[in-house]
Image (tube, rainbow, N blue to C red):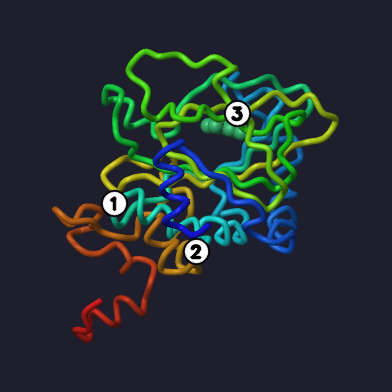
Amino acid sequence: MDASELVKRIRGDGYAIVANAVDCTLVEAIKRELAPWLMRQHMGRNDFEGYHTERVYALLAKAPSIAGLIEHPLVLAIVDQLLPVNYLLSAALAINVHPGETPQRFHVDDAGGNLLKRPRVHVGVSTMWALDDFTVANGATEIVPGSHLWEEGREPTPADAVTAVMPAGSVMIFLGNVLHRGGANQSTGVRLGITPQYCAPFIRQLENMVLAVPPEIAGRYSDRIQSLLGYSVVEPGFMGYVDGLHPKRLIDPEYRGRKARGIPS
Ligand SMILES: O=C(O)CCC(=O)C(=O)O
């Protein structure tokens, strides 16, 4: 299925799954980089994060290969059609669900949009990458099809949800206003997911990305990742400027040079 067909499905059902979107080489590289952060020292601090779940934030500062998921061409081609230009990376975290974890409460990811009454437009798009096989037993994400169209006050029941069963290397893409939750892990193994989430450029990012990823690290990434982090400006109002200037000047000497030479960019 190409990006436009997937967008059609996402607008209808609220989500779509692309099986085997990356190969095991990238999955293994990410797992290697994340290994020092997944030693049970970052367990969830409340029921929502999950007391039997490890959560690792600020991933672009810790595991650079994650960029391959965040700027995956098919995913970005889809998000390009679902969010306004210059959308941002709102969150990118690892969720490693251990045996014994209970289901999360159902929720939406574009929390800023919750200030608006339902039914409402989405102001975010989330992805959930399976780094292990996602199964019914190990706590695969449960998603409520069509819930992005629900009216105010309608509450989901577990029977409304479907389980996002998918092999490692697959991705589920879903609208930010779709109800979902992490499932219970009744297996004997862990379930590692990475969830890059994107938001409209006028919405506050869940994670403060320009602080989470230090400038010297941000400067090593592609133009696209830098823009997603917040090294970009949005019209109207040149939103995102620093001291009246484009923020990319702070991390990209070449950009400063181009500007100094009067080359438009
Ligand atoms: O781990 C999952 O499958 C979903 C987690 C989630 O939706 C969240 O923490 O916001």
The location of residue 257, given as percent across then percent down, is 30, 82
Question: Toward the viewer: 190 or 42?
Answer: 190
Q: Amino acid at mark 1?
A: Pro
Residue labelled with disc 1 = 84
From the viewer's perspective, is the residue at label 3 or at label 1 nearer? 3
The quadrant the C terminus occupies is bottom left
Q: Which one is in front, 117 or 90?
A: 117
Foreground tag (2 vs 3): 3
How many C-alpha atoms fall within 10 Å of the one at disc 2: few (<14), some, or many (≥20)? Answer: few
The one of 20 and 229 positioned closer to us in this rendering? 20
- Secondary element type, mark 2: helix
Q: Secondary structure at mark 3?
A: strand
Give the mark nearest the N terminus, 2 or 3.
2
- Judged left or right of residue 163, residue 135 is right
Picture residue at 23% right of the left edge, 79% below the top: 259
- The image position of residue 38, as x and y in percent, is 73, 42
Quick one: label 1, few (<14), some, or many (20+) residues within 10 Å?
Answer: some
Which residue is pictured at 41% across the width and 55% down the height? 229
Pick whichever of labels 2 and 1 is earlier in the sequence.
2
Which three-letter amino acid code belongs to the residue tagged 3?
Val
Mark closest to the chain's N terminus, 3 or 1: 1
Q: Give the CA distance from mark 2 to mark 3.
A: 27 Å
Q: For the view shown, which residue lies furthest in the bottom direction?
A: 261
Which residue matches tag 3? 162
Q: Residue at 74% across / 26% down in the picture?
A: 185
Q: Which mark is residue 73?
A: 2
CA–CA distance between discs 3 and 1? Answer: 29 Å
Q: Percent from the top left, x then y, of residue 140?
A: 67, 33
The quadrant where residue 85 appears: bottom left
Determine the residue positioned at 48% across, 40% down: 174
Left or right: residue 74 compared with residue 200: right
**To which quarter of the image does residue 81 belong?**
bottom left
